[in-house]
Image: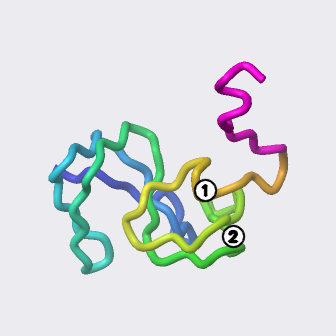
Amino acid sequence: MNKLIKIHPNDNILVITNPIKVGDKVEINGQFVTYNKNIELGHKVAAKSIRKNELIIKYGVPIGSAIIDIETGDHIHLHNMKSNYIPTFILDNQFENGK
């Protein structure tokens, strides 16, 4: 069963259409990626390597930028991307501890 879909030909991400589970092996552009964590429906993974500061493209338009290098198949979320349009908030230890 296919777990990923490319929405637009210019996208450099793939959207998860069926949840990825630990141990799943998925082919992305001829490269096999084995996942060591669960990734939920609707989340994004890299369709190719994306370098730090490179635009992340979904629906054929940029939705943000990489804040670190991202490898093919890596989960893309707030830990490795930022929005170019709105502030991106990441909880830090001070906030989590109520400070």
Q: Which amino acid is tagged 1?
A: Tyr
Q: Main secondary structure of the magenta part?
A: loop
Residue drawn where x is 51% and y is 70% of the image: 70
89 with respect to 46 (left or right) = right
92 with respect to 70 (left or right) = right
Whether residue 90 is in magenta: the answer is yes
- Residue 40, compared with residue 34, is above or below; it is above
- The residue identified by callout 1 is 59
Which of the two marks, 2 or 1, is nearer to us in this view? 2
* Element at label 2: strand
45 with respect to 67 (left or right) = left
* Element at label 1: loop
Span shown in magenta: 87-99
Disc on res. 55: 2
Residue 46 percent coordinates (x, y): 46, 65
- Residue 49, compared with residue 24, is above or below; it is below
Q: Which amino acid is tagged 2?
A: Leu
Residue drawn where x is 21% and y is 62% of the image: 34
Disc on res. 26: none
- Local packing at callout 2 (Cα closer than 10 Å; few below 14, some 14-19, many 20+) is many
Q: Colour scheme in the image?
A: rainbow
Residue 58 percent coordinates (x, y): 60, 58
Quadrant that contains the C terminus: top right
Report, in whole angstroms, how far the alpha carbon at label 2 lies from the one at label 1: 13 Å
